[in-house]
């Protein structure tokens, strides 16, 4: 069944969005400040308000006006994360549309509140997995690409919640709609999970390049994003259009409390203007304006390690458990890691998400004490993914390959090891799907770009045989893969003529 909603016009025809298809996929909206991004979100939410339950993460309080016309409940976040989780659970139980207003919180508490609310939606009982649109405005605040002024703990919680929404929310009925001013500031693993795109006016080259890449446009076509009028977006995706098309967003029934600045005439010149500015009013004398104290930054502890090591207090003294034999403990950790990778969704999850799952499984197995930190987990995860087909033969250079991988960035180690194993065994060059899984993404193009980065570092060399089939060599090991599928890898870096 198709449930089309009207976003505006494309030429003289209505621009329709298939709501049923959107619930099965996800949407990314991008546009610089003033491009009409929030207006587009408002139009989409208004048109679908009577068809599907909605939850809006609103950092500026701009969408509270939906309550008066469409019955949304406005939830004012006050910093109580446990209460927000319970509210989110009741939202899913009773199928009420809500606006989570975060405007009264600082950046750190905004991230914590969003993480708690999204976590409550995500962890709802299976009986309440009803379809829901979850719109997140200014998504770069909650899924930043790099660390900022907020604490590491708040960033980790918020990024994990946003990753769950975009990567695993579909099975729970959650369809993520994320809007951002800057693609370059949005975490790549969050943006990469979107299948539908609405790209508005963009000026910075790096954002235009990423927008063109997501839409499958050539780089020279990226310049067109600068020329888009306000309220116009390039649409692409299964819920919008199979080919890029430009739409003009239609009007909305509600308005934001904030509006675009307009020119207003200045007041007439006043003779006593100086005294008005420099003389305190009676109200200011009675209640002087005090500067708001700045919160002192506190280094955040590693919450995941604390959870792994947590032992609930007991009023009854229990006999101390005998320490586990190191070999048995190592075997148990390897078994837990294998169970994590055996999950059907593991290939599309980030190492941080898998690490959280790993620590929970260790607690279930009652593996006391320090399990392993995130860096060690990433290293073992890379090796485990590369050895998924079985152990590599002894004296084959596999140990040397792991030493080389240890000197690479964490996210590239697994990709290198998959290539190195294929080269050691003389197997065909890995396919796009194999490379994408090793890198922890669903995009073969992104994995190929990482191969080009490995080649720039001298870790690998790519070439093609006379049939155009790709071959990857590992110079430090003196081995290379067999020919793969033709036209799988991009051409190697251009060499300057001598």
Image: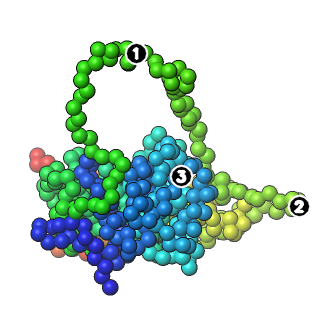
Earlier in the chain: of badge 2 and badge 3, it is 3
Crowding near pointer 1: few (<14 within 10 Å), some, many (20+)?
Answer: few
For the point 65% across and 57% down, the residue is 307
For the point 16% across and 50% down, the residue is 226
Crowding near pointer 2: few (<14 within 10 Å), some, many (20+)?
Answer: few
Q: Tell me the residue that label 3 is attached to.
A: 77
The scheme the figure's colours follow is: rainbow
Residue 197 in the figure: left or right of residue 498? right
136 up-or-down from 292: above or below: below
Earlier in the chain: of badge 1 and badge 2, it is 1
Residue 197's quadrant in the figure?
Answer: bottom left
Residue 58 in the figure: left or right of residue 367? left
Q: Residue 242 at x, y = what percent?
A: 21, 74
Is residue 23 something one can see in this rendering?
Answer: no
Is residue 42 something one can see in this rendering?
Answer: yes
Q: Residue 31 at x, y = what percent?
A: 27, 53
Residues at marks 3 and 1 touching, judged by CB atoms closer than 8 Å? no
Crowding near pointer 3: few (<14 within 10 Å), some, many (20+)?
Answer: many
Q: Which mark is residue 316?
A: 2
Callout in the foreground (2, 3)? 3
Q: Tell me the residue that label 1 is attached to.
A: 278
């Amino acid at each position: 069944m198709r449930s089309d909603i009207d976003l505006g016009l494309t030429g003289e025809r209505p621009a329709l969005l298939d709501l049923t298809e959107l619930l099965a996929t996800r949407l990314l909206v991008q546009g610089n400040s003033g491009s009409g991004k929030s207006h587009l979100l408002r139009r989409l939410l208004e048109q679908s308000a009577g068809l599907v339950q909605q939850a809006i993460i609103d950092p500026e309080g701009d969408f509270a006006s939906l309550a008066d016309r469409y019955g949304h409940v406005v939830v004012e976040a006050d910093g109580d994360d446990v209460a927000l989780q319970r509210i989110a659970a009741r939202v899913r139980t009773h199928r009420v549309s809500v606006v989570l207003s975060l405007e009264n919180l600082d950046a750190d508490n905004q991230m914590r509140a969003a993480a708690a609310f999204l976590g409550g939606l995500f962890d709802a009982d299976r009986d309440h997995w009803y379809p829901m649109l979850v719109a997140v405005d200014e998504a770069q605040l909650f899924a930043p690409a790099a660390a900022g002024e907020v604490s590491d703990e708040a960033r980790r919680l918020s990024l994990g919640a946003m990753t769950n929404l975009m990567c695993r929310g579909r099975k729970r009925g959650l369809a993520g709609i994320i809007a951002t001013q800057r693609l370059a500031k949005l975490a790549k693993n969050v943006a990469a999970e979107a299948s539908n795109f609405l790209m508005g006016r963009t000026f910075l080259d790096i954002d235009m390049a990423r927008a063109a890449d997501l839409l499958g446009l050539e780089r020279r076509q990226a310049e067109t994003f600068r020329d888009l009028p306000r309220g116009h977006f390039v649409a692409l995706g299964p819920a919008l259009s199979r080919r890029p098309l430009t739409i003009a967003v239609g009007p909305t029934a509600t308005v934001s409390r904030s509006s675009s600045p307009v020119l207003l005439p200045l007041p007439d010149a006043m003779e006593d203007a100086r005294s008005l500015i420099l003389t305190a009013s009676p109200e200011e004398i009675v209640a002087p304006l005090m500067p708001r104290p700045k919160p002192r930054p506190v280094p955040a502890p590693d919450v995941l390690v604390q959870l792994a090591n947590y032992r609930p207090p007991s009023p009854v003294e229990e006999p101390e458990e005998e320490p586990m034999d190191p070999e048995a403990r190592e075997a148990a950790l390897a078994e837990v890691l294998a169970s994590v990778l055996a999950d059907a969704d593991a290939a599309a999850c980030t190492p941080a998400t898998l690490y959280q799952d790993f620590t929970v499984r260790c607690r279930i197995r009652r593996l006391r004490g320090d399990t392993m930190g995130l860096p060690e987990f990433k290293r073992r995860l890379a090796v485990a993914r590369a050895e998924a087909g079985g152990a590599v033969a002894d004296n084959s250079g596999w140990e040397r390959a792991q030493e080389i991988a240890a000197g690479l960035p964490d996210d590239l180690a697994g990709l290198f090891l998959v290539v190195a194993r294929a080269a050691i065994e003389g197997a065909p060059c890995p396919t796009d799907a194999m490379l994408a899984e090793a890198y922890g993404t669903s995009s073969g193009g992104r994995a190929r770009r990482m191969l080009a980065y490995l080649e720039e570092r001298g870790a690998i060399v790519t070439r093609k045989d006379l049939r155009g089939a790709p071959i990857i060599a590992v110079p430090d090991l003196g081995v290379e893969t067999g020919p793969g599928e033709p036209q799988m890898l991009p051409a190697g870096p251009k060499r300057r003529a001598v």
